[in-house]
Amino acid sequence: MKYVDEYRDGKLARAIAATIAAEVRPELSYRFMEFCGGHTHAISRYGIEDLLPANVRMIHGPGCPVCVLPVGRIDDAIKLARRRDITLCTYGDLMRVPGSQGSSLLKAKAAGADIRMVYSTLDAVRIAQAEPGRNVVFFAIGFETTTPPTAMAILAAQKKGLSNFFIFCNHVLTPAAIQNILESPDVRALGNVRIDGFVGPAHVSTVIGTRPYHAFAEEFEKPVVIAGFEPLDVMQAILMLVRQVNSGRHEVENQYIRAVTVDGNLKAQDFVAQVFEPRDSFEWRGLGMVPNSALRLREAYARYDAEKVFAIETVQAEDNPACECGAILRGVKKPADCKLFGTLCTPETPMGSCMVSSEGSCAAHWTYGRFRDYARQETQRHEFEQKAAS
Amino acid sequence: MCLAIPVQVTELLDDDMARVTLDGVSKVISLALVEDVRIGDYVILHVGYALNKLDPGEAGKTLALLDEAARVTEGARP
């Protein structure tokens, strides 16, 4: 595949790893957070951590919209879907996410609720058009990448004069969340790890551009390198971050120049601004309430707003108290440090946000990383036995 | 969730729609969020919408930079 395969070349990745190893200063340690779940997945899947020198550590951030959606909002969606007059359309990612008391959209569907998995908001609009007797609610989640398609769906429904199409809006914003990692009140309770730089979002940035990160880089004096989701993109971004740290810079750099510009996609931004406005505050699973971190429909589009039309009042649901997601999302703990990891909490039965989607740090560690832990333990055991024998 | 893939536009259709191909798999997507797309262009596809055009020049530059980063240590190695 053009524009994919050439960024997955293993030989080149090893050569760049050698450059990173040659350029890191042995007396320093480098801790970088990749915000996006897409990067977390790439780092785990392609074994990038194994290629990095011991003093470069990647901290997996909260950038997976499925993971950070609070349980209460899943409960809301299930409640909507159980109404006889409603057809709930959702991206497939949300089907297995557990709500309260072991519920999920998948189980609600099995019990007879009209829930349909769609690939695109275009499909949801098509269903509303074909079935005027049904109230079609689209369960909208996602970052800035996924928001413009939702805006387009509302505008399409308006153009077609549909009165049976609604949005249950859960769109969230990345810059606010990145900032929250560094300055939220929870940091005091959970402790904090130093983060020396950020691998910035790939496709979020195709929409919003590189500009929104400048204030952050300046205020917190942290370098940000926006990177593509392929393994070589991530390797190059890490090298760029190492070079910034070594030279004492904290700039916004763009590694993903083939798709990201300074301004981003202005047309998409205009559509989003036309339909949505910021919420004062929104709950992120694992982070708590984050100010100015989400969007809702503007008053002019209230007739498409499922929250208003169907009078949704979210009831907060608590995660398992033993769940360490909050600390893991901030890099204070690693997935294997949580006593639920791999016991009660697996991708089949996720208890916390980091295990919910394949992009969460616990799910990525479960699928790829834990084998490295086993291998390390085995090597240590072997060495110990050899020593004991001699 | 934010995964998006590069696909090539093979046919421009009515209503800002287009047919695209990814290694022979064909799909109809929306071009409503992008401008000036021509047949043969590569776009980044996310949930049925093209988010941006891929810039072949910048893509080439990235590959050149990757090569350069890979070569830095080659001369230094024994």
Image (cartoon, rainbow, N blue to C red):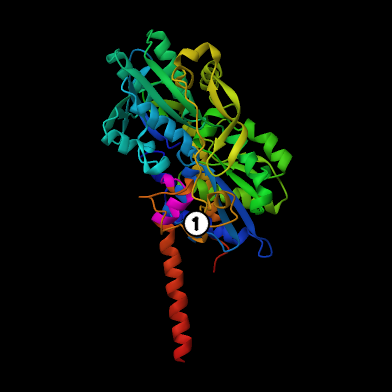
The dominant secondary structure in magenta is helix
Q: Tell me the quarter of the image containing the N terminus of chain A.
A: top left
Residue A223 vertical position relative to residue A203 in the rendered view, above or below? below
Residue for point 31% across, 17% down: A134
Q: Report whether residue A349 is seen.
A: yes
Residue A26 placement: quadrant: bottom right
Give the side of residue A126 with respect to residue A295, left or right. Answer: left
- Which one is nearer the viewer's eye here, A237 or A75? A75
Q: Chain of mark 1?
A: A
- Residue kind at label 1, given as amino acid type: Pro
- Which one is nearer the viewer's eye here, A51 or A353? A353
- Which one is nearer the viewer's eye here, A112 or A243? A112
Q: Which residues are magenta?
A: A356-367
The location of residue A79, given as percent across then percent down, is: 39, 29
Residue for point 48% across, 37% down: A69
Residue pointed to by mark 1:
A335
Residue A24 placement: quadrant: bottom right
The location of residue A72, given as percent across then percent down, is: 47, 35
Give the side of residue A262 with respect to residue A232, left or right. Answer: right
